[in-house]
Image: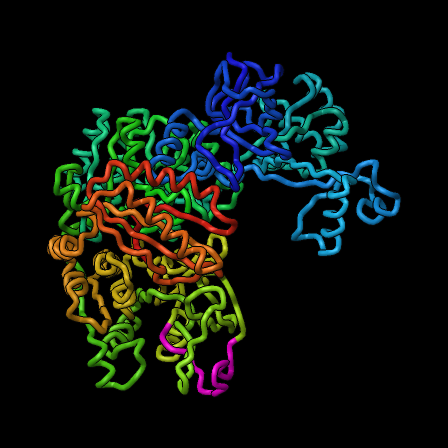
Amino acid sequence: MAQIAQVLVDVPTMQTNDPYSYAIPDQLADQLQPGMRVTVPFGHRVVSGVVVGFTTSTQYEGQLKSIRAVLDLAPVLNPELQQLADWLAQTTYAFRITCIQTMLPNLLKASVERQIVPTNELTATERAVYFPDGAARDFDTSKLDTDTVAGLLKLRRAGKVTVTYQVKDKASVKTTPGITTSLAPQQLEDLKQSVATRAPKQAALLTYLQALPDHPVPQAKVAHAAGVSSAVIRGAETKGWLKRTPLEVYRDPFQQPVKPTTPLRLNAEQQAAVDAITTAVTQRQAKNFLVEGVTGSGKTEVYLQSIAVALQQGRSALMLVPEIALTPQMTNRVKARFGQRVAVLHSGLSKGEQYDEWRRIDRGEATVVVGARSAVFAPIQHLGLIIMDEEHESSYKQDENPRYHARDVALWRGKYHDCPVVLGSATPSLETRARAAKGLYTRLVLAHRINDRPLPTVHIIDMRAELKQHQGDDDFSAPLLTAIQDRLDRHEQVVLMLNRRGFSSFMMCRDCGFVLKCPNCDISLTYHVNPRVMKCHYCGHEEAVPTVCPNCRSRKIRYYGTGTQKVETALQKLLPTARILRMDVDSTRRKGAHEKLLNQFGQHDADILLGTQMIAKGLDFPNVTLVGVLNADTALGLPDFRASERTFQLLTQVSGRAGRAEKPGEVYIQTFNPDHYAIQLARTQDYERFFVTEMHMRHQGNYPPYYYAIQLTASHEDESVAAKAMYQILAAVKQGLSDQAIILGPTPKAIARVKRKYYYQVVIKYKHEPHLKAVLDQIRQGSQRAPRGLAVAIDAEPMNFM
């Protein structure tokens, strides 16, 4: 094998897509493989990197440095994921090492730690002050006081200490004691006879050890089966009867066991969809399907029966869901059908659980993967089917480097594995539906609910007239309150959606109009009642609730708008007997909170589930007969070309939570814009008419899917630096554009300041610009030499321009 390795180094301050050449030490010769993580010297420090290839020569004229160490016994990236990282870097304008890091679980992302090492130049006094135990010390400025940091920096300038960089691999395997016997069966029998009368517990253990297999058995299992305590086992180890060795075990992310299920009988529409999908699975066709089905039409059963066919053929399946909140319900349904073959991947798991699930998949022990966006990178092999549920959801797009859309990655992997990709939704994105119209996707329609159950009856409440008539609380209309009380009387359940968390949207002075804003962001602070504090939902800044206006000192400062906490409080006063569960970002911070809340609601431990948009999708509770949308206008007022589409999708999805079983459903949508086409068409779930209407609007505005779009952003703490950079970038971009391209900006972003940084943007809309990619690649590379603190971002096909 060639003795020069090509290594992509992980150096955030100066990234490149070109690997560096490193000599391979003799002890590692013929052992390295592409996809392995290594540590290498880089400048004056040691960093981690990934081997991406080998060569026999290099253009570097100096002495090559050698690889220091290998972090893995086997590649952490298989050949497919290595190719995928290269493609992702090209299409998202990110760096290859960033893409690789995105694919790996958190515990496989090595960290670099700095240590201060004393030299012989130190005086006895300096050694006593800074190195009292004589050993090197960690250099973490967040844990050292200012005087100590200053002193250490002075010693370094004087050459009295040196700084070393150690790469720490965070990957850790969970173990439990494993038991193996040390003696032959006859020896165990002789010992048992000698202790039978005076030590019956020891005799019981010896009996069990006689039947012990050759491989280690978990100590807990031995103790339970033999009926002995851990003290008896430790005593047996001391006597030399058995050995205890670490036994690797997986962390189990599943909170509770699930009851196995069997395939359900399909209706004609479902059967036609399954037949089309499984034919592509059987024939190994990289065919793309759009399953467009009204809410409650049985899309999940189509997915499950299609997965079963892939498994029967010895292949695996990947299923993506958009929200962590949906993962417990969907995972339980998949696990109930396919048992231990199911693995789950999402950010709600602990780092250890993510690592163990990743290894189960990589080892081929799990052949069905269910997860949120990042699960699209699961190292699953022999893929036979990829499913993306609720494909229209914006959460499938990552908003930081690499800015990928999970749908694009899924389509790439489908081609790689020659397997079909199924995109499912009751309200497909306009881009996906347009591709189906062009014949790029095969459209499979589920137009009817299971057993021909009717869609819920939808009432639109004009809140303008309601407030004039009742002069009351703008959270609840009289018809909605009456309908809620009716469900409580009938012991049925209610889902209420408010697309905003917190107690109230903002605080404003009634005398001077001052609005309390975040000092770091151009956004008003949100009032939270528990704990009683003002919070910024962008940077996390918190401060005390003011009692007087900071601007005019008036005491007439009040909170306005509404939030989930405020609605919960008001609802409890209006309906004191109602049992209410609140589900939003604040109430679901703890691990497992999503599943706990949904289980409580599913077991009818609550009458009303109040939440943000996380409750709008995928949830299936047969006793829910009423859905209320408290404010349907939240998204309509945003400066976003997808505002109408998102409103229609959200209202259609949340309406679909009602009447999914035998009891009929009813929906109340409260709005100040009752005549808007997105709201009117959501009332009848008329997606096709909405598609035609919205496509006409997009065509008039030159927006996707009629045009491609690129968003370029520059940010800096100094507004003038960000603006100047954006104008320089625009000048560079114009060189590669034709006169057919449409340029918007430079302008400040809709929220111009976030986390003390100002944001300026340019949006490019185009149909065919062959030189644009080369120009953007130059901008990406040039951004590495940008002034300190200036960040430049390139987003291909942004989900919004805000």
Name the quadrant containing residue 422: top left
- Would you say 132 lies left or right of 704 here? right
| Magenta stretch holds residue 554 | yes
In the displayed structure, 587 sits above or below 764; it is: below
User: Residue 124, how many percent across, how many down?
Assistant: 88, 44
- Would you say 295 lies left or right of 107 here? left
- Would you say 523 lies left or right of 498 here? right
Dominant secondary structure (helix, strand or loop) of the stretch shown in magenta? loop
The answer to whether any part of residue 457 appears in the image is yes
- Would you say 339 lies left or right of 149 here? left
Range of residues picked out in magenta = 545-562
| Residue positioned 26% across, 44% down in the render | 300
Say which quadrant the C terminus sits in. bottom left
Residue 453 vs residue 383, the one in the foreground: 383
| Residue positioned 22% across, 81% down in the render | 466
Name the colouring of the figure.
rainbow
In the displayed structure, 632 sits above or below 703; it is: below
User: Residue 183, how many percent across, how many down?
Assistant: 69, 19
